């Protein structure tokens, strides 16, 4: 009987060790997603990613940076997948062989926000270029992301279209910060800034800034998701990266994005299903 008892104990111990090893293996499985501060600051990913993680059995580690930095992390093989908003940079990233299987996911828009006093007199302008021209002409304080984000790239495209070079001007402040920090800074300085609508909505009450210009087609803000090329970096978690891409563009993922309404209004809109 003693031998049988000790045999069962050894078997039970072995099973416990095996379960611990299996549990550690599952916990260690991770998918690295580099994305923009807008998807993080708005709370979107915290709201919807648990659905994917539960269904897939993987933990998504989110790295929240500007689009330029996100693409650089992917180019260096430091992440497995990117979710960003700068279509020109995304296409160049894929064309250079750094990423594959880019798909449209969702969109929102940019808004030009500023203090209630509106010293440059841009309130109600229907064209963002006209408003930016007024800000430059009046030398009203403007806070730029200054972080090579998709938002800063859009802002720079406006200045280029106007033939204005604001860098280094006393009224133009390059913060080198994420969208939430820039909105906070603009609120404290009573300055203008360009923001994505989702992050602005999250920070509106904290900053007191108001939407002064919106609705211009130039302010459209689409997001795309791209897997890092496994031929360049065979060690990346390509299987889970593709699973995440498929989920974002599936009925379940699209429904999760639609359902994200933290203040009762949608902050992101799914792109019409043209990926298939």
Image (cartoon, helix red, strand yellow):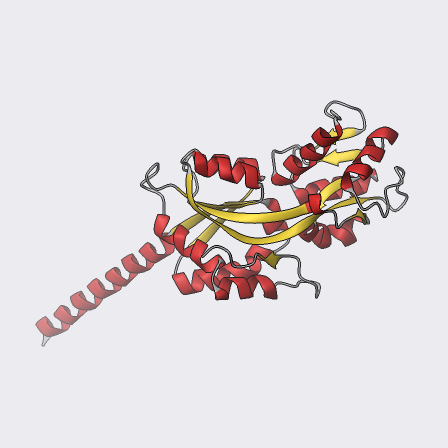
Residue located farthest toward the top when viewing the structure as drawn = 168
Side of 215 where 107 appears, left or right: left
Side of 97 where 260 appears, left or right: right
Say which residue appears at 65% left-offset and 63% top-offset: 261
Say which residue appears at 68% left-offset and 36% top-offset: 145
Percent position of residue 114, x then y: 82, 43
Percent position of residue 118, x then y: 88, 42
Give the answer, above or below, for where 1 lies relative to 266: below
Give the answer, above or below, for where 178 lies relative to 172: below
The quadrant the C terminus occupies is bottom left
Percent position of residue 87, x then y: 56, 41
State which quadrant residue 219 falls in. Answer: top right
The residue nearer to you, when weighing 26 against 221, is: 221
The residue nearer to you, when weighing 9 against 43, is: 43
Total marks placed: 0
Let me know if residue 229 appears in the view.
Answer: yes
Percent position of residue 80, x then y: 42, 45
The quadrant the N terminus occupies is bottom left
Give the answer, above or below, for where 147 lies relative to 275: above
State which quadrant residue 178 falls in. Answer: top right
Side of 21 where 163 appears, left or right: right
Say which residue appears at 47% left-offset and 49% top-offset: 61
Side of 98 where 70 appears, left or right: right
Let me know if residue 70 appears in the view.
Answer: no
Say which residue appears at 69% left-offset and 42% top-offset: 181
């Amino acid at each position: 009987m003693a031998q049988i008892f000790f045999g069962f104990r050894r078997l039970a111990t072995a099973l416990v060790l095996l379960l611990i090893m299996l549990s550690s293996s599952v916990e260690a499985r991770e998918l690295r997603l580099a994305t923009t501060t807008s998807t993080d600051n708005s709370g979107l990913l915290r709201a919807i990613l648990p659905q994917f993680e539960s269904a897939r059995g993987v933990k998504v580690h989110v790295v929240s940076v500007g689009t330029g930095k996100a693409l650089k992390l992917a180019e260096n093989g430091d992440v497995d997948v990117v979710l960003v908003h700068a279509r020109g940079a995304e296409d160049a990233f894929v064309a250079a062989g750094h990423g594959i299987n880019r798909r449209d996911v969702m969109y929102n828009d940019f808004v030009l926000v500023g203090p209630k006093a509106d010293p440059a007199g841009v309130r109600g302008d229907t064209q963002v270029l006209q408003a930016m021209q007024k800000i430059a002409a009046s030398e009203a304080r403007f806070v730029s992301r200054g972080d090579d984000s998709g938002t800063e790239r859009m802002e720079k495209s406006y200045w280029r279209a106007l033939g204005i070079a604001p860098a280094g001007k006393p009224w133009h402040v390059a913060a080198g910060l994420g969208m939430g920090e820039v909105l906070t800074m603009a609120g404290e300085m009573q300055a203008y800034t360009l923001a994505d609508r989702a992050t602005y909505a999250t920070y509106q009450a904290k900053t007191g800034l108001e939407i002064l210009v919106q609705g211009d087609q130039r302010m459209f803000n689409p997001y795309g998701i791209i897997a890092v090329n496994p031929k360049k970096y065979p060690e990346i978690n390509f299987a889970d990266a593709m699973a995440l891409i498929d989920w974002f563009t599936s009925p379940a993922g699209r429904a999760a994005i639609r359902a994200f309404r933290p203040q009762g209004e949608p902050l992101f809109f799914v792109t019409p299903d043209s990926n298939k």
